[in-house]
Structure formats: C-alpha cells, structure tokens
Image (tube, rainbow, N blue to C red):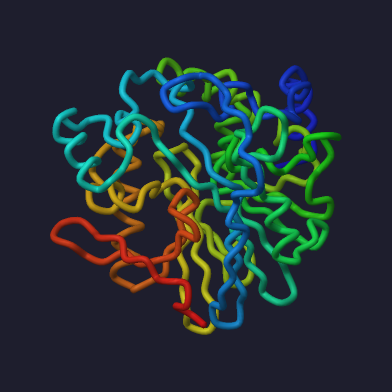
Amino acid sequence: MTSVDRRDFVRLNAAALAGAVLIPTPLRGGEPGTGTRRPAPSGNRSPGFYRFGLGDTEITVLSDGHFHFPIELIAVDDPLDVMAFDVDPERREEYFRSNLFPVDHIPLQASPILIDSGDRRTLVDSGFGAGPDSPPTGGRLSSSLAAAGVPPESIDTVILTHAHPDHLGGLLDPQTGAPAFRDAEVLISEREFEFWTGEEAPAALEPDFEAEPLLAAARGVLGALEDRVRTIRSDEEVATGIRSIPSPGHTPGHIALGVESRGHELLIVGDAVVATHVSFEHPEWHLFTDIDREEGVRSRRRLLDRAATDEMLILGFHFPFPGLGYALEHGDAYRWHPAGWNVLS
C-alpha cells in the first residue's frame, strides 16, 4: 500500500474517522434476545491469560472477555440462524439442545493471541477495545496483558485475521484515539483492506448485515492507523515462523495463521471456524455471518482437514477459553478434542 493510497483513503473516509475511537452502539452487550444493555457485573470475570510453549516460541492466549452475539446487527429472526442458517429449525434446535448449547442467544469468547519468538512479539487480533460502547463483559485485553506481564509498547506487530469490530477495536485507545500499541505495525491482508476501504463492502453487506456500524468501525480504525498499516498477501510468511493462510468466506480477505517452531505447528483459525461443536461436526452448515457462506464452508473444511491430517494444535478466537485443541476426523466431518491445560508443559 503506497503513501498515496493512505492519503486517499483518509480523505475519502474522513467522516468515518470521527467515530474511530468507539465501537458502534449495536455491538453493546445486552440481555439475550433484546437490545438492552446489562449492567457490568461486579469484579473481573475475565480468565486473564493462558501461556504455553511451542518449540522455541511462547504462545499466550489473552482473554478479551465474553459477549452475546448482537443479532440486531443481522437480518435473522432466530438466534440459531447465526450458526446454522440453512438447516431445518427442528433439526438444529435438537442438535444445539443435545450439546447443551443455548438456543435463545449465542455466547462467545474473544481471545487474542500473543506469539513471542524471543526477539519479536506479535499479537493476533486485538479484541473489542474498552470503549463505553463495548460489551460490558468484553474489552478486557489491556488487563489481561497486564496480568501476563506484557507492556503494550513491547508488541512489535499486530496481525488482523479480518476487520470486524471484535478483532480490531482494541487497536485504539478508547480515551484518546491514539494507537493502543504505540510501536506496532498492523498487518492485514490486501484483499481484506481493499474490501473494507473500497466501494465493494456496502453492497456485499446489505441486506443481511447492518453495514453502517461495521464500515464505520473498520474504516475508522484502519484510517486512524493509516501510517502503520501494511497489507500482506493472503499466503505468505509474514514473520519468522508465521504464515498467513487464505480462508475467505467469513470476509473476503479473512486469513488464518500457521505458526511453526522446531517442528511444532499451531493453526490459528480466526473466525473461519467459530464453534467447537457445530463448526467441527457440521462444517457444511452455513454460518449466517459469513459474507460468502459456500466459500466459508470450503475454507472451514480445508482448515480442519489440514489440522486433522497434520495433527496440528488449533486455537480459535471464539472457542471456550483458552480455545486450544485438535481436530479429529469423525466420519465425513470432525470432532473437537480439547488439548487440556498441561498439553505442552
């Protein structure tokens, strides 16, 4: 991305930058099935962090908290449409109930990941941020970093799997609008950047999504950080031992990440694989929030097949914390196998 591109982007999206600090109002947490905001619970309910070794690399899963998926942002009548849009309602409700999964709301974790190679710290996604319009149980990344002993200024790079608010909102200080990671370069796939900053996104989002808040968040944050944003290809080594893996569908330029150190491999799936039950056992079921749902199915299957075949560890941004486990082949689909807290100790 050239400097001319950045200047043009900021000029064309100046209005969006005015709201760059805040996550859009519809993303506020609320009571399941309503648009109302619940009072923040007393105390810090975030689990904080979980750290393990991968070869010579140290991986820290950081909790940004949890939230209920804001179905007011999308055109669905039933919350289960979010996870199984193309499935018969009775069949999917039976499936969700049998797995003890709520049928009236969609609870999700948010877990950015820190990769420390010893000479470089790379953060994968940044969570919501702690602005007043973030979910009351979200926006915990800064406290989790502090608990893990990681100063924000020590982070060298932030890689975005995609540009949804719960993945890039934490890039800006909610009080000042300044970069939350003052010395970090921000990497995003070229296709993802083009989608959110160009003319394609509004038509691609409507009528299934409330395009305005999603666009405001993506354009606002990326524009505010324009001098430090660098676009990457969706399949390249972006840092030593870290490779981007194309996984479009959820968004056009969504990437997963492969991490390798001394023969050990980890697959970070972002939002290409969202749930540890339905996404594994029924990867063919459509996720409503995938912009291209059939492409999302293909990406999900490719990632899970690769993980199962190569026996790779998997980390999922929205999996139950810490979200670390394996994909096991199970018939023509897969089964989630949690790794356990002491898997690499």
- Residue 211 or residue 89, whichever sits in front: 89
Left or right side of 321 for 297: left
Could you say which is closer to the camera, residue 332 or residue 197? 332
Q: Is residue 76 above or below residue 285?
A: above
**Where is residue 258 shown, x and y percent of the image?**
49, 64
Q: Is residue 260 above or below residue 139?
A: below
Q: Position of residue 35 (x, y in %)?
A: 51, 19
Q: Is residue 133 positioned above or below 182 on the image?
A: above
Q: Position of residue 182 (x, y in %)?
A: 84, 51
Depicted 279 relative to depicted 40: above or below: below
Q: Which residue is pictured at 20% across the width and 36% down the height?
A: 92
> Which part of the image, by quadrant, shows the N terminus?
top right
Q: In the image, what residue occupies the spot 81% across and 42% down? A: 227
Q: Which residue occupies the foreground of this view, 90 or 126? A: 90
Q: Residue at x 71, y 39 (%)?
A: 130
Q: Residue at x 31, y 23 (%)?
A: 78
Q: Nearer the viewer, residue 46 or 265?
A: 46
Classify residue 199 as left or right of residue 297. Answer: right
The answer to whether one can see residue 245 in this image is no
Is residue 159 shown to the viewer in this render? yes
| Left or right, 10 with reference to 108 | right
Return the x and y of residue 226 as percentages of the image width and height.
Answer: 77, 38
Count of numbered circles in the view:
0
Please identify the residue farthest to the front as the structure is shown.
42
